[in-house]
């Protein structure tokens, strides 16, 4: 069985980065909650201009058109700010990088 080893020490940067998708998803959830609050608080009186009363479901849908994109954008901005703050706390560490290669046929014959 022949094996060849290569060993080297390199430097790597370690940084914690927020997951943008999580923050944007939370922004969407908060947008849906805000649309629900706007729907519950709104008054459902007849419109003076059109003489129409909008049902709560329609008000909720229209509110979603505004609150969800705003929540999505705010979640992305929060994640971007947190990434900029995390960039200040970068650490450089020394990493041992080792590569071991062997004969696969010899490993199978030995029962490994």
Image (tube, rainbow, N blue to C red):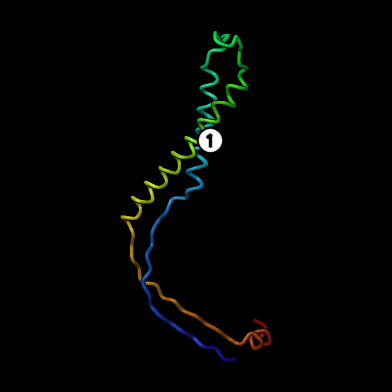
Front one among 12 and 54: 54
Residue at the limit of the structure toward the left, as seen here:
88
Question: Tag 1: Cα neighbours inside 10 Å, few (<14), some, or many (≥20)?
Answer: some
The extreme bottom residue here reads 2
Question: What residue do we see at 61% from left, 12% from top?
Answer: 53
User: Residue 1, how many percent across, how many down?
Assistant: 60, 91
Residue at 55% x, 31% y is 65
Question: Which x, y percent locates residue 84?
Answer: 35, 51
Rendered view: 50 above or below 100 = above
Residue with the mark numbered 1: 29
- What residue is drawn where x is 58% and y is 24%? 60
Instruction: Give the total number of marks visible in the rendering.
Output: 1
Q: Secondary structure at mark 1?
A: helix
Q: Position of residue 11 (x, y in %)?
A: 36, 71
99 left or right of 54? left
Q: Residue furthest front?
A: 49
Frontmost residue, 76 versus 88:
76
Q: Position of residue 90 (x, y in %)?
A: 33, 59
Q: Splitting the image into 4 quarters, where does residue 16 fall?
A: bottom left
Q: Is residue 15 above or below residue 21?
A: below
Q: In this rendering, is residue 72 above or below 40? A: below
Vertical comparison of 112 with 48: above or below: below
Q: Quadrant of the C terminus?
A: bottom right
Left or right placement of residue 82 versus residue 38 in this view: left
């Amino acid at each position: 069985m022949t094996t060849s080893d290569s060993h080297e020490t390199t430097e790597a940067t370690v940084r914690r980065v927020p997951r943008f998708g999580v923050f944007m998803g939370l922004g969407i959830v908060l947008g849906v909650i805000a649309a629900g609050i706007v729907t519950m608080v709104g008054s459902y009186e007849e419109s003076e201009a059109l003489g129409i009363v909008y049902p709560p479901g329609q008000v909720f849908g229209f509110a979603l058109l505004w609150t969800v994109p705003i929540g999505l954008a705010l979640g992305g901005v929060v994640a971007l700010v947190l990434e900029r703050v995390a960039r200040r706390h970068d650490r450089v560490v020394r990493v041992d990088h080792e590569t071991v290669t062997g004969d696969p046929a010899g490993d199978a014959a030995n029962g490994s």
